[in-house]
Amino acid sequence: MGNGYIRRISVVLGFVALVAAAAMGVWRYGYFQALDQLARQGQSDLALASDRLTGQLQRYRELAVLVADHPRVNAALAGEDVSQAEALFLEIADKTAAQDIRLTNADGLVLAAARPDQPGLDIAPLVARAAQGALGWGNGRTAHGTRVFAYAAPVFDARSRVTGTVVVTADLAGIEWDWVGSNPAVFFTDARDRVFITNRSEIVYWQRSDEGPGLQPATGPALPFDSYELGRHEVWQLGWGPYLPQNALHLVRPLPVIGMTGEALVDVAPARRLATLQAAAVAGLCLAFGALLFLATERRRTLAEANAQLEQRVAERTAALSDTNTQLRREAEEREEAQAALAQAQADLVQAGKLSALGQMSAGLSHELNQPLMAIQTYADNAQAFLQRDKPDRAEDNLGRIADMARRMGRIIKNLRAFARQESEPALRVDLAQVVQSAVELTTPRMRHEEVTLTLNLPDAAVWVSGGEVRLGQVFVNLISNAVDAMAGRDTRALTIDIQNTSVIISDTGPGIETPDRVFDPFYSTKEVGASEGMGLGLSISYGIVQSFGGEIHGANGPDGAVFTVDLQPWTQEVAA
């Protein structure tokens, strides 16, 4: 008893450990998938923020180039009164929100400024680059601590010599104002690896750590930080305040056009929550199944123990109850024979059910073949009678009808053979109208039996698409059969098939699609349990077939019922190549 109890405890603990391992695997897989999705979204957000910053700064670059060509600038460089140039600079700065506009001569001496009383950026390196005929640009901080970005455009004379420089300075605080506090956290580091622009003001001027990834405050002690690699992703663990995530996906985007590097910190908490929910769902299902299996096993063990006790008591009374024991054995044998007979009867019933289903499927096509056979016999008798009466024209007409009936039977048999053939060839040139026509012919007996009204709109000419005749026929037969099943028992049963260019639209008057987003998922089915072909794989297989030919299949709800659209690739010389 003790050993059995220990064994059961060991099995339970082993099963729990297995479920925990499976849940951990599901969590890890889900976490990686969610991180990939977060990385894509974060890269999009970072690209958007980078493009916005670059675009806003580019306006000041173009402004510097345009102002450098203004006549008042050339007049000020020629020695005329600079007051008009300063008035022009002030007017432009007020209209464009520029922090300052300055004009220097070829030696770097400031001649005019929009706001001469305000301390500005050290523009000597920018002026030196502009003196070489190139566009100078850079970032820095004024004496008052204002973060600015400046562009220096050279001023050329008639001989293309640099006579001066126009420097346009932009206040970065005004640019940041529109997106401070937005998600995710984005910051831009300059050439000195310091945070110069960001939507989180608390990390401005933080410096890149010399020991590896991460940032350190400009003043004061370093705050908690750690990082690790997770696949192809870098995750930062932060303790930088309530407005920055504790665990963040670190993304980088170089911006050489402004000499900075854009970086983003995307919170990974949603990815962890999603992975945890997936792992919890898997663990819950496994534990529920294990609990049911354990209860069933315990019940079986209890019954086995009771049976063992009963056998022991019977063995003790064998001497006194031998006749009764013999009778019980005889009854047990009869019961086994009855069970064997019952099992055989059940197997026969299953086989009969299979044969009945096969007969139901073949009844419609048998009728399609039997009707032309009877017509052929009638036309043959008529032709013989007309020949005896010396009426060859009428006999020829009956023989022509016999030929038409024979062709009709051959077409039905051809469609059956084509539908049953195993097709493994690559995509070929296929007549879409002929494939749809063949599928309709195969399903016509079923539609006639279910009293479905068919409206078939086929083009006059062939519609050549890329695909396989058998596999595309399987798709359309499946869609038509599903539509007939959906309309079963309804007052109005109408099926419409339209071919528009290289698209086939199949609409019915059924109840519609309950969840269109899941209709192509494997094992998804709205048919009752036990119904034929109710495994939910038909539409999933059809989806894969159409995708393999480069097409698309969509399911939606129309005004009267479900509408399925199959879009295929037209056959061209490029597709053939």
Image (tube, rainbow, N blue to C red):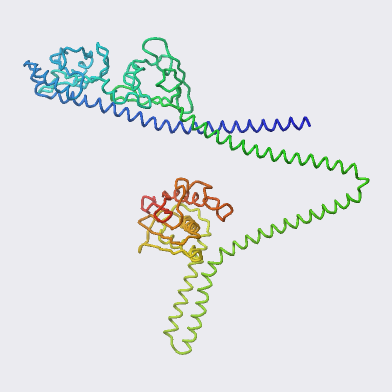
Whether 463 is drawn above or below 159: the answer is: below
Residue lying at the far bottom of the rendered structure: 389
Front residue of this view, candidates 90 and 428: 90
Whether 439 is drawn above or below 123: the answer is: below
In the rendered view of the protein, which quadrant contains the N terminus?
top right
Taking the image as shown, residue 6 lies to the left or right of residue 18, namely right
- Point 93% across, 45% down: residue: 319
Residue 141 seen anywhere in this rendered image of the structure: yes
Residue lying at the far right of the rendered structure: 319
Whether 321 is drawn above or below 275: the answer is: below
Front residue of this view, candidates 145 and 121: 145
Q: How many marks?
A: 0
Taking the image as shown, residue 128 lies to the left or right of residue 261, namely left
Q: Residue 395's quadrant in the figure? A: bottom left
Residue lying at the far top of the rendered structure: 220
Taking the image as shown, residue 471 lies to the left or right of residue 91, namely right
Q: Residue 8's quadrant in the figure? A: top right
Q: Residue 218's quadrant in the figure? A: top left
Residue lying at the far left of the rendered structure: 80
Q: Position of residue 446 (x, y in %)?
A: 51, 63
Q: Position of residue 460 (x, y in %)?
A: 35, 64
Whether 499 is drawn above or below 95: the answer is: below
- Point 64% across, 37% down: residue: 290
Residue 470 seen anywhere in this rendered image of the structure: no
Q: Position of residue 456 (x, y in %)?
A: 40, 63
Taking the image as shown, residue 159 lies to the left or right of residue 235, namely left
